[in-house]
Image (cartoon, grey):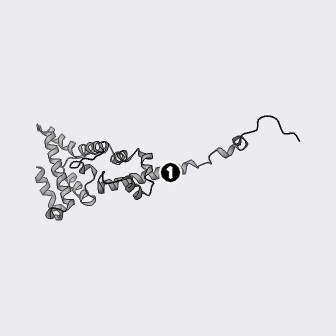
Amino acid sequence: MTEPTGPRPTAAEAAPHATEPAAGRTAPRRRDAAASRERLLRAAGELFGERGYDRTTARDIGERAGVDPAMIARYFGGKALLFVAVLRAEDRSESFADLFDADRLAGLVSRFDRQGPGPVAQVAVRPYEDPDAYAAAAAELDRRVVGPLRERFVQEGDEQAALRAELLTAAFVGVVLARRAGTLPHLAAADRDELLPLIRRLLD
């Protein structure tokens, strides 16, 4: 028997369906990637808040998230950009009242008592080694705390609005950090309702 002449079909041509992805196969992968990214983002937010940026490693984040730490570079571009993503995860359109607003002040003190001062508060007293992380945290501190105070003082006609805003921010951050550290026993043990009027007097 003679064999047919002409070029033989390639493997892909002989079995055209073998190279085509099964219907729906890529969708689960995309969902898995999105879930892994979300777990990394959540774990990083928790650890940065607990330990700060410099004391949190990519391995720590991966272990808490249950995701290979190498995926941090793949999904975010590295730890510094993951930190930026954590800060930007909140609603960027959100506006913040200044510390003279009673509800704002009470909410911050309650949050710090419950979760500890996060990376944005910590950057006021301890700059990060990574310049990208430092710049991102400093920008958020200004947006959330310093800026609203500065705007208030500008509207009041204070010629030292910027300096006064930063001074009061430093005082407030110092109070919450010292309270969390426990080094000053009366400050650490004070009830929130007892502490708030004293902080307001300090700000005034």
The residue positioned 24% from the left and 51% from the top of the image is 122
> Of residues 17 and 126, which is closer to you in this image?
126
Q: Position of residue 143 (x, y in %)?
A: 25, 43
Horizontal and vertical percent position of residue 110? 23, 58
**Image height of 40 relative to 95, above or below:** below
Q: Name the residue under label 1.
A: 31
Q: Out of 91 and 45, give the one closest to the viewer.
A: 45
x then y, percent, for residue 79: 37, 48
In which image quadrant can residue 181 be found?
bottom left
Name the quadrant containing residue 84.
Answer: top left
Q: In this view, does 110 lie above or below 34?
A: below
Q: Quadrant of residue 3?
A: top right
Mark 1 neighbour density, 10 Å: few (under 14) some (14–19) many (20 or more) = few
- Of the 4 image quadrants, the one containing the N terminus is top right
Q: What's the residue type where badge 1 is placed?
A: Arg
Q: Residue at x 45, y 46 (%)?
A: 74
Residue 7 relative to residue 29: left or right:
right
Give the secondary structure at mark 1.
helix
Q: Is residue 74 left or right of residue 172?
A: right
Residue depicted at x 12% and y 39%: 160
- Left or right: 163, with 69 as reference point: left
- Residue at 21% of width from left, 53% of height from top? 103
Q: In this view, does 183 lie above or below 154?
A: below
